[in-house]
Image: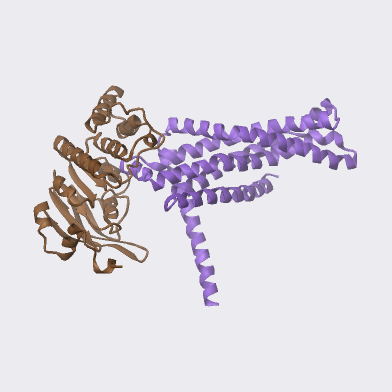
Amino acid sequence: MIEIKDLHKSFGTQRVLKGVNLKIEEGQVTAVVGRSGGGKSVLLKHIVGLIKPDRGSIFIRGQDITKLSGKRLDEIRSQIGVVFQGGALFDSLTVYDNVAFPLVEKGKLKKEEIHKRVIKALSDVGLQGMEYKYPAELSGGMRKRVALARALISEPKIILFDEPTTGLDPILVRTIHKLIRQAHEQYGFTGLIISHEIPEIFEISDKVAMLHDGKIIEVGTPEEFQKSENPYVKNFIMGLEEQEDRL
Amino acid sequence: MKQFLKVIGRGVLSLFLFLGRIFLFLLEIIYITFTTPLKVRNFLRQIRFFGNKSLVVVVFTGAFSGMVLALQGYYALNKFGAEALLGPVVALSLIRELGPVLCALMVTGRAGSAITAEIGIMRITEQIDALTVMAVNPIRYIVVPNILAGFVTFPLLTAIFDLVGIYGGYFVSVYALGLSEGTYFSQMELYVDMEDIKVGLYKSLSFGVIVTWICTFMGYNAKYGARGVSKATTEAVVLSSVVILIWDYMLGALLL
């Protein structure tokens, strides 16, 4: 479904991605874990064409999106939903309008149908009754749920989650993970989750990959990943600092 | 010496890079304006935003500009015994020059800065990225409505500025300086013609585009958190103000 081949990206003199190779299978949830600032979000932004790579390719359903632009890129993007790190909700719009936004902009559905879908999406994420609140009036967890509802509303084939639980308490982390799992069962999308929630992320992923020093150094099922002999993976799972981090 | 040349070179390069980016941004705006339908709701909202944000400050500055023009004009004209020409002096100064320029500066400080801050926050909170991944062109959705709203509202606000300024001048001339009511307006009718109004109109139309272009560009390219937005906002106001004054001279010389 999504295949990333030899992806390189530098910002100035800083090399962030140094040849990422990763295959994300159709209908599965793949988690990419790794240290903060390791380029996970940069990787995600490449997949939706927000950043162009220096080298390498990303195939989505057989099309190399790094070579696309304009309408053809938009066609691919319309199959993808993204849940951004901070939610990226539009401040000037209510919860209802935020969730309805992708459908309103596409302009293919009638008002009544959009209304039905928005109400359902909000109830799926447990936010019924919050339709007319503004993002600034919501808690962090609620904002993430609205972002999830907005990503789900157009029933995309692929959903990318950029650290969907960052900054939330452990109970909310579980709640959001549960919502992702339920949504995945209901809609059957292909998911990519950028996260560093260990061990919670193992419960909702079919596959886990670790990005370290600009490369994917381990991929496997959660069980395989936890048994990895790679010292970086072991340290990451156990939360041990590496030599360069020692004070 | 080598270090000095390095600094100069880097400055020149970044200036050209900036100019290249801001003009490419303008080209994209022009292309999108003429090839995609306008987001009418956003356009109307921005017209209201400009009017709402700027009307009070425009009325106040317009009134006091007219008043001070009358006061100083009277002082100068009195020396030549030409007080009767106070009306045309106030009107011509406002319509041709001060109205468009001061109004543009006021709107830049009031609404232009707000646009930059709003778009800058949208940039750093990934709202612009969210639009892009939803296949909604952010230039079409955010920038074009602002530019067109500037194009429409600047001349209207300038007209209000001129009108209030002329009446401010009238108030001072007639009630404080003792000029006759008829002289103030009749001389104005005699000396102010359509060409003068056109000059003011062309200036305000172009200021509307310049201010919104610069302010949206700065917001669109804001970086690195709250400090980045604050830097972008300050730069947008300073750059817009400088360009307004430069463009005013250039257009003034061209239309003289």
Percent across and percent down for residue A2 are: 18, 50
Query: Percent from the top left, x then y, of residue A114?
Result: 28, 27
Q: Relative to B211, is A5 on the left or the right?
A: left
- Decide if residue B10 is in sight here: yes
Seen from the viewer's position, the closer of residues B23 and B181 is B181
Q: Is residue A106 visible?
A: no
Q: Is residue A145 above or below residue A206?
A: above
Residue found farthest to the top? A112
Asked whether B134 or B222 is in front, the reply is B222
Residue at left 22%, top 50%?
A197
Which residue is painted at 14% across and 64% down in the image? A230
Which chain identifier belongs to the brown chain? A
Dividing the picture into quadrants, the one containing residue A217 is bottom left
Image quarter of residue B55: top right
Position of residue B44 relative to residue B72, above or below, is above
Total count of labels: 0
Point 29% across, 32% down: residue: A103
Chain B colour as displayed: purple
Q: Residue at x 52, y 74 (%)?
A: B3
